[in-house]
Amino acid sequence: MIGVGEGMDAMSGRGSGTLAALAFECSPVATIYTEDRVVKHGNAAFAEMFELPAERLFGLAMELFYPAIVESERVAGNAGRALRATGRHADERVMRRQGGSLFWCAVTGRALQRQDPFAQTVWCFQDLSRQWNIGALRPRDRDVAMLVCAGHTAKHIGHMLNLSPRTVEAYLARIKATLSVRNVAELVSRLRPAFPHGAEFQTRMRASVLATTSSAVTPGAHSTS
């Protein structure tokens, strides 16, 4: 057995570059290095979190790790402003594993060049799915949650999604139970950073509403299921 002192001596004989690479590869924190939002290097913890072989990480665009391109672009816009201002950014967001499941994730980033924050960036990720199982939300749950976060009432949401207000309330009850939140205010404060909003949000929801109404058997009829 190698003693602590011997182990430290052996490590001290390695170059600093080798130790840095070892620390990166063996870190329990999921970490990647990106250039222009393309993965150039990722450690084993990141590969495991996103259900990918480590050898496949190189060259992947960051948008592949989000539920939709529009969400990837929104997150990048928010992060870019903070990185330019301070060189650092942290938030919580919905991300997508390569198997397709969604999960809530805490993300911290550091830009090596503040004037061009995405040129060289290091990102660390923490899986928060045990606290917030966003992946357990069904597609319609997500639609309702997005509209609640945008400030719409149950009546307005029902009109937009071709649902009765009572059905919307039932969806909200299920969402709160799934995410273990006590009320709508807590739900909104937690989920709002995860969903698009403003003009971008309205564009996405208009497309969703058109798809919903075009597939309805009787236009204008309200679902009760």
Image (tube, rainbow, N blue to C red):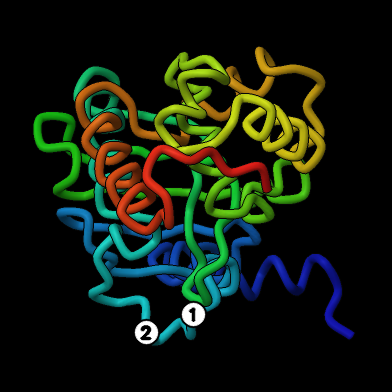
Q: Residue furthest right?
A: 1
Q: Nearer the viewer, residue 105 or 33?
A: 105
Image disc number at residue 52: 1
Q: Residue at x 55, y 58 (%)?
A: 102
Q: Which quadrant of the rendered structure holds the N terminus?
A: bottom right
Mark 2 residue type: Arg
x, y (%) of residue 94? 50, 46
x, y (%) of residue 45? 58, 67
x, y (%) of residue 167? 66, 34
Q: Residue furthest front?
A: 218
Q: Nearer the viewer, residue 5 or 135?
A: 135
Q: Residue at x 26, y 29 (%)?
A: 202
Structural distance between the alpha carbons of marks 1 and 2: 7 Å
x, y (%) of residue 149? 49, 22
Specify whether 214 is left or right of 9.
left
* Residue corresponding to mark 2: 56
Mark 1 residue type: Leu
Q: Residues within 10 Å of mark 1 (few under 14, many from 20)?
A: some
Q: Are marks 1 and 2 in contact (CB under 8 Å)?
A: yes
Q: Residue at x 37, y 84 (%)?
A: 56
Residue 137 lies, with reference to residue 42, above or below; the image says above
Q: Residue furthest left?
A: 115
